């Protein structure tokens, strides 16, 4: 009998050790996290529910409804939830915008959209000649050329950037301060080329400011395709007159909410890991990528860890921030309340770069901790993640910045992000379930590793 036992053990050593030693290595744990995400598709199901509710423009009933909906879901999953009141601006688009101009070949009708925060045109619209601006430097040289005209900003996103976010931020000025700057030179209206990385027929909206303007002038975006055509026609006929009509308006601020969903840590409940995205969206699509994806990534990451009995020893907080798009009001409230309550955030993670395949992570942390995050790189290679950069984290969590905080931003593939960003194309059909799910699994895996190996400031 003894001999048979020894023989058995030598062949199948795990028979006696299986009970006492946990065989799970980090590789195996990550494999299980990614597998569960891909098999269960829980995040994609939540994204479907969210987008079926419609657009979630800040200040709209829909945006707040989405918060209530996900509070119920988080409650049912065993989170302790609460809502933080946030005062948010309210701006409504009104009737469909109009824009057109005449050429020798006939009338060209465009498909424009008002920029978020813009005032309306006069009731019957506005007609004026155009002045094309192809770089910000050019604007500095303008003296009287814009007087009584519509400024046509036609500054493309620079295709030379591999990371389209850099191209976006280097040309976003035309949208954000285009009207402000043109009004100083006597312009009566603004048309901008959509901030989109490709030539497509969607107008892309986004926020703008009048801060510091003596005169407010209306501003709209046209598609990159329309902008190219308009530029050509304007070159052929510099006197062409452009018609624009919008009846959007800003209304009184309203109260909406951040959703905070918490699970207390088992060993270090006073240390908090916060992760989130923003629940508000633009109104042309349904904010599937921006930032429905980030919200479901965050909730699903904790759901995955809970499913596998891998919840961190620290407290985790999932936050759906309200109003990233019109001024980060929710993030500011969350940071202020956290300070008041002495919440000790040690790790903050944000997903607000879309639901495409995760390619890596960007880290903001003390150097020694950045180096420790980089040590995880080989664990993520099987999942296509290889970019470990130090290029910021996220707009909402940036409000929590302190030099000791470990801040991470998910970095999905971004080649196609600005094709759909802030446009009617940002809908569930543009999200791949598999790509979305690997994003959730990535956040879960990072939380698991950072917590397990105590990658936090001492
Ligand atoms: Zn966003």
Image: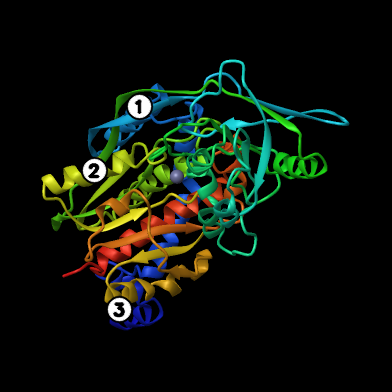
The residue that mark 1 highlights is 64
Q: How crowded is mark 3: few (under 14 residues within 10 Å), some or many (20 or more)?
A: few
Quarter of the image where ligand 1 sits:
top left
Residue found 61% across the figure and 33% down from its top: 148
Residue found 30% across the figure and 75% down from its top: 367
Quarter-of-image position of residue 80: top left
CA separation in Å, label 1 and label 2: 16 Å
* Residue located farthest toward the top when viewing the structure as drawn: 123
Quarter-of-image position of residue 203: top right
Query: At numbered mark 3, what does the secondary structure look like: helix, strand or loop?
Result: loop
> In the rendering, which numbered label is found on residue 83?
none
Give the percent coordinates (x, y) of residue 42.
45, 42
Residue found 42% across the figure and 47% down from its top: 297
The residue that mark 2 highlights is 334
Q: Is residue 41 at all visible to an observer of this figure? A: no
CA separation in Å, label 1 and label 3: 70 Å
């Amino acid at each position: 009998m003894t001999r048979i036992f020894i023989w058995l053990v030598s062949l199948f050593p795990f028979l006696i050790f299986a009970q006492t030693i946990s065989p799970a290595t980090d590789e195996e744990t990550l494999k299980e996290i990614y597998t569960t995400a891909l098999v269960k598709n829980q995040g994609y199901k939540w994204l479907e529910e969210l987008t079926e509710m419609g657009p979630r423009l800040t200040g709209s009933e829909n945006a707040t409804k989405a918060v209530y909906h996900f509070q119920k879901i988080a409650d049912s999953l065993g989170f302790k939830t609460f809502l933080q009141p946030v005062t948010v601006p309210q701006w409504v688009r009104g009737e469909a915008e109009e824009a057109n101009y005449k050429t020798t070949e006939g009338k060209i009708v465009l498909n424009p959209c008002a920029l978020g925060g813009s005032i309306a045109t006069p009731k019957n619209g506005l007609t004026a000649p155009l002045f094309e601006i192809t770089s910000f430097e050019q604007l500095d040289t303008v003296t009287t050329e814009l007087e009584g005209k519509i400024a046509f900003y036609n500054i493309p996103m620079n295709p030379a950037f591999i990371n389209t976010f850099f191209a976006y931020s280097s040309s976003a000025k035309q949208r954000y301060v285009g009207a402000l700057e043109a009004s100083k030179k006597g312009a009566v209206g603004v048309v901008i080329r959509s901030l989109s990385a490709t030539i497509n027929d969607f107008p892309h909206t986004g926020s703008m400011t009048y801060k510091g303007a003596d005169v407010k002038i209306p501003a709209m975006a046209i598609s990159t395709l329309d902008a190219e055509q308009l530029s050509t026609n304007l070159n052929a006929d510099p006197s062409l007159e452009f018609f624009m009509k919008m009846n959007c308006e800003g209304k009184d601020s309203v109260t909406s909410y951040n959703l905070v969903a918490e699970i207390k840590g088992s060993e270090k409940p006073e240390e908090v890991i916060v992760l989130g995205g923003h629940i508000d969206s633009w109104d042309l699509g349904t904010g599937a990528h921006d930032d429905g994806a980030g919200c479901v990534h965050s909730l699903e990451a904790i759901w995955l860890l809970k499913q596998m009995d891998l919840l961190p020893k620290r407290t985790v907080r999932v936050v759906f921030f309200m109003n990233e798009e019109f001024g980060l009001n929710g993030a500011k409230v969350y940071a202020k309340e956290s300070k008041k309550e002495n919440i000790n955030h040690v790790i903050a993670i944000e997903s607000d770069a879309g639901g495409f395949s995760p390619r890596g992570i960007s880290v903001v942390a003390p150097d020694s901790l950045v180096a420790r995050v980089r040590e995880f790189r080989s664990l993520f290679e099987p999942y296509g993640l290889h970019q470990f950069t130090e290029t910021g984290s996220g707009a909402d969590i940036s409000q929590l910045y302190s030099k000791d905080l470990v801040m991470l931003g998910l970095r999905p593939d971004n080649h196609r992000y600005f094709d759909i960003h802030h446009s009617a194309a940002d809908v569930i059909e543009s999200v791949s379930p598999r790509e979305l799910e690997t994003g959730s699994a990535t956040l879960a895996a990072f939380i698991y590793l950072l917590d397990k190996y105590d990658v936090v400031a001492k």
